[in-house]
Image (cartoon, helix red, strand yellow):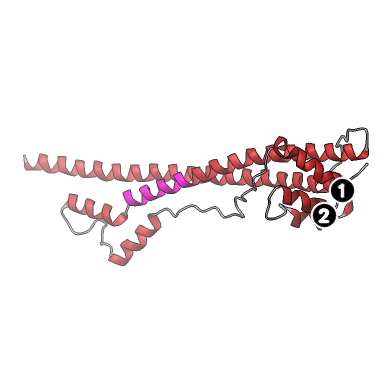
Amino acid sequence: MEDDADQVLKALQVHIKKEIIDNYFADRVYLEEEEEILRREAQEYRQSVDLLQRRYHAFYQALGADAAIAAVVKLLSLEEWPFYREFGPLPEAARLELLRGRRAWGLTAARRYRHLVFDLYEELQKETLKLKEQYRKIITHLTLINEDIDKFNLSYDFGLIAEQIEALEGKGEVISGGLLAPEREELSTRMRFKHQKLTDEDLPPLPDLPPLDRIKGELARVLARFHRP
């Protein structure tokens, strides 16, 4: 009877250890896949921000003078001129290319100027709104991944796992030859996941832009100061 009991106990020990290992690798694969998805989301967002930068440049080019840009930025209550640092050094040929294919409509030059700025701003505001929602979803995903990482690191602390297996086997070492305390700590550290981080460079935040309808009258008055009939 003791031999049968010993065999059952050994089989149970093997099963428990296998389950721990299987669960560890399954959860690790899940986290690695989620981290890869997060990296792709951040990369796609960054590419979309690069396209938004070009929209800002076209908007600045349509406004024309720096004084007009300054007045509009002030109207929008923006602390900085978004993406202007990249716009400033552009050669004239590159600036003209920004508005190529843009239809200017209106009976007078002033109206054509105003409607061009209106159209560009509306596109800019709508695209910004979409990207801010995308940004919010990525930040939420980042928070959830880090919560899962905390749970993983708590569930798969190597020192605790080793103690559990040693208790099952009724002996003082879980791995042949044993592990010294510093070795266990090193292995435990290597098994842990590090928190994911996204800097402003990875995930640039965007300013809030009010809808065109809300500022259209004030914007028209600002533009009239810089382009009269």
Q: Residue at x 90, y 40 (%)?
A: 110
SS of the residue under disc 1: loop
Residue 208 drawn above or below residue 89:
above
| Amino acid at pointer 1 | Phe
**Residue 98 visible in rendering:** no
| Foreground of the two, 134 or 73 | 73
Residue 184 pos. (x, y %): 31, 61
| Amino acid at pointer 2 | Ala
Asked where in the image residue 19 lies, by quadrant, the reply is top left
Q: Residue at x 15, y 43 (%)?
A: 9
Give the dominant element type of the magenta stretch: helix, strand or loop.
helix
| Foreground of the two, 114 or 149 | 114
Residue 111 drawn above or below residue 87:
above
Residue at the disc numbered 2: 67
Verify whether residue 196 appears in magenta. no
Q: Quadrant of the N terminus?
A: top left
SS of the residue under disc 2: helix
Residues at discs 1 and 2 in contact (Cβ within 8 Å):
yes
Residue 157 pos. (x, y %): 32, 54
Q: Residue at x 85, y 49 (%)?
A: 64
- The disc, 1 or 2, on the residue closer to the chain's N-terminal end is 2
Residue 3 drawn above or below residue 83:
above
Q: Quadrant of the C terminus?
A: top right
Q: Which residues are magenta?
A: 143-155
Asked where in the image residue 27 lies, by quadrant, the reply is top left
Residue 122 drawn above or below residue 165:
above
Q: Residue at x 21, y 54 (%)?
A: 166
Going by the image, does 35 lie left or right of 1? right
Q: CA distance from mark 1 to mark 2?
A: 8 Å
Going by the image, does 26 lie left or right of 78? left
Residue at the disc numbered 1: 226
Residue 164 pos. (x, y %): 22, 51
